[in-house]
Protein backbone atom coordinates (compact mmCIF):
# COMPACT_ATOMS: atom_id res chain seq x y z
CA UNK A 1 0.00 0.00 0.00
CA UNK A 2 2.83 2.37 -0.77
CA UNK A 3 6.51 2.63 0.08
CA UNK A 4 6.47 5.00 3.04
CA UNK A 5 6.29 2.18 5.57
CA UNK A 6 9.70 2.17 7.18
CA UNK A 7 10.77 2.51 10.81
CA UNK A 8 8.08 5.00 11.85
CA UNK A 9 5.90 5.44 14.91
CA UNK A 10 2.87 4.39 12.87
CA UNK A 11 0.88 1.37 14.10
CA UNK A 12 0.73 0.07 10.52
CA UNK A 13 4.50 0.10 10.25
CA UNK A 14 4.81 -1.96 13.41
CA UNK A 15 2.34 -4.50 12.08
CA UNK A 16 4.17 -4.75 8.80
CA UNK A 17 7.49 -5.18 10.59
CA UNK A 18 6.10 -8.08 12.62
CA UNK A 19 4.57 -9.59 9.49
CA UNK A 20 7.81 -9.58 7.50
CA UNK A 21 10.86 -7.42 8.31
CA UNK A 22 12.46 -8.38 5.01
CA UNK A 23 9.52 -6.98 3.08
CA UNK A 24 9.72 -3.72 5.02
CA UNK A 25 13.40 -3.32 4.14
CA UNK A 26 12.51 -3.89 0.49
CA UNK A 27 9.82 -1.21 0.61
CA UNK A 28 12.16 1.29 2.28
CA UNK A 29 15.56 0.96 0.54
Image (cartoon, grey):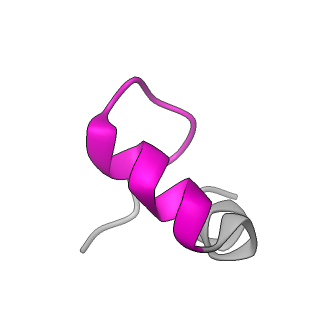
Q: Is residue 22 above or below residue 13?
A: below
Frontmost residue, 2 versus 23: 23
- The answer to whether any part of residue 5 appears in the image is no
Residue drawn at x 70%, y 64% as measured from the top left: 21
- The answer to whether any part of residue 25 appears in the image is yes
Q: Is residue 12 magenta?
A: yes
Q: Is residue 7 left or right of residue 22?
A: left
Q: Which residues are magenta?
A: 6-19
Residue drawn at x 70%, y 62% as measured from the top left: 25
For the N terminus, give its image quadrant. Answer: bottom left
- List x then y, in percent, for residue 9: 40, 23
Name the quadrant containing residue 2: bottom left
For the C terminus, give its image quadrant. Answer: bottom right
Residue drawn at x 53%, y 45% as measured from the top left: 6
Frontmost residue, 8 versus 18: 18
Frontmost residue, 7 versus 18: 18
Q: Is residue 9 above or below residue 13?
A: above
- List x then y, in percent, for residue 8: 46, 29
Q: Is residue 14 left or right of residue 10?
A: right
- List x then y, in percent, for residue 19: 54, 71
Residue drawn at x 58%, y 60% as measured from the top left: 18
State the predominant SS element of the stretch in magenta: helix
Amino acid sequence: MGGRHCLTNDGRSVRLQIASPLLQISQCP
